[in-house]
Amino acid sequence: MVLAGGSMPAEVHARAVAVQNAYIGLWEDFLRNRLSVAGERALALLQILGTIPEGSKDADLWVTEADFLYIAGACHRNEQALLERALACYSRVLALPESTGNCNARRMRAETLMRLRRYQEAFD
């Protein structure tokens, strides 16, 4: 993982790495329908992500944040505020020149729109 903004304090980098390392386990919990566990883990990991300055986040970390917001929103009865934040993160990533072809981010953006019942936008 190469974080934006060049070097960063070691403690911030360590938090970013810890969050990235939790990524697969969180998705496994979500996909195995352990929704209460996944929802709470996602919220806890989002608190850690919140301590990382925006200028230090690269595309991968923005996608990670978006995915965690998506999982948290889905696990909390499609909570609109969380899903809207996920949508903003996916849109931010897709606006980056190096990420315009990121099919995973595009797919998750569409899934988020569907959870928000914005079906026309999801299929545009």
Image (cartoon, rainbow, N blue to C red):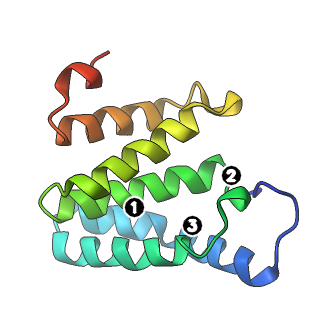
| Cβ atoms at labels 1 and 3 below 8 Å apart | no
Q: Where residue 39 appears, x then y in whole percent?
A: 25, 71
**Circle 1 SS class:** helix
- Crowding around mark 3 (Cα neighbors within 10 Å: few <14, some 14 to 19, many 20+) is some
Q: Residue at x 52, y 78 (%)?
A: 48
- Pick the front one: 104 or 65: 65
Q: CA distance from mark 3 to mark 2?
A: 12 Å
Q: Earlier in the sequence, mark 2 or mark 1?
A: 2
Quadrant of the image occupied by residue 8: bottom right
Residue at 63% in and 46% down: 59
37 shown above or below 123 = below
Mark in front: 3 vs 2: 2
- Spatial CA distance of label 1 from label 3 is 11 Å
Res 20 label: 3
Q: Which residue is mark 1?
A: 68
Q: Residue furthest front?
A: 81
Q: Residue 118: image x %, image y %?
A: 19, 30
